Image (tube, helix red, strand yellow):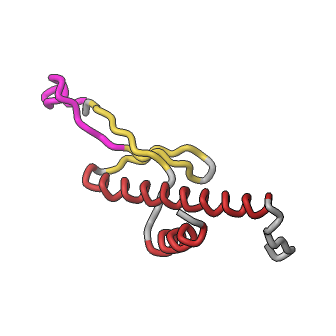
């Protein structure tokens, strides 16, 4: 991916798609009900989203039906990060070659 295609992709991703920086984890839990199947070893599956929010690590319960959508939002963020890295590397290359136009407005 070159700088121009990275900028185009970045613009589209940021303006059109939701994104989240974080990760999903799954846990197997018991509910505490002595007659539930989980008390016999068949544990409940629960999903959590780990994020940084307001400067603190947060763990948010995610209903299982939301997991595919949240995974896509996480993927969108990773694609944004890749595009930013491509643009940054291009700018560094230009800077090191002395070709970057640097002004006070930048």
Residue toward you, 35 or 14: 14
Q: Is residue 11 left or right of residue 90?
A: left
Percent of width and height locating residue 98: 83, 64
The residue depicted at 13 percent of the width and 30 percent of the height is 37
**Residue 24: which quarter of the image?**
top left
Q: Is residue 45 magenta?
A: yes
Q: Is residue 10 left or right of residue 47?
A: right
**Residue 27: which quarter of the image?**
top left
The residue depicted at 13 percent of the width and 28 percent of the height is 35
Percent of width and height locating residue 32: 25, 29
Name the outermost residue toward the top: 40
Q: Is residue 92 left or right of residue 68?
A: right
Reply above or below: 79 against 47: below
Residue toward you, 24 or 105: 105
Residue toward you, 4 or 11: 4
Percent of width and height locating residue 59: 46, 44
State the extent of the magenta-drawn residues as a range.
Answer: 32-47
| Tally of marks | 0
Q: Is residue 59 magenta?
A: no
Tell me the quadrant of the picture where the C terminus can be found. bottom right
The residue depicted at 54 percent of the width and 56 percent of the height is 82
Residue toward you, 31 or 106: 106
């Amino acid at each position: 991916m070159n700088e121009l295609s990275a900028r185009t992709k970045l613009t589209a991703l940021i303006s059109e798609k939701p994104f989240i920086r974080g990760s999903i984890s799954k846990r197997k839990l018991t509910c505490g009900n002595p007659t539930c199947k989980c008390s016999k070893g068949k544990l409940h599956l629960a999903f959590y989203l780990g994020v940084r929010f307001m400067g603190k690590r947060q763990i948010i319960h995610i209903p299982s039906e939301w997991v595919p959508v949240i995974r896509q939002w996480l993927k969108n963020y990773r694609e944004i990060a890749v595009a930013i890295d491509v643009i940054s590397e291009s700018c560094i290359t230009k800077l090191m070659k002395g070709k970057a136009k640097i002004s006070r407005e930048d």
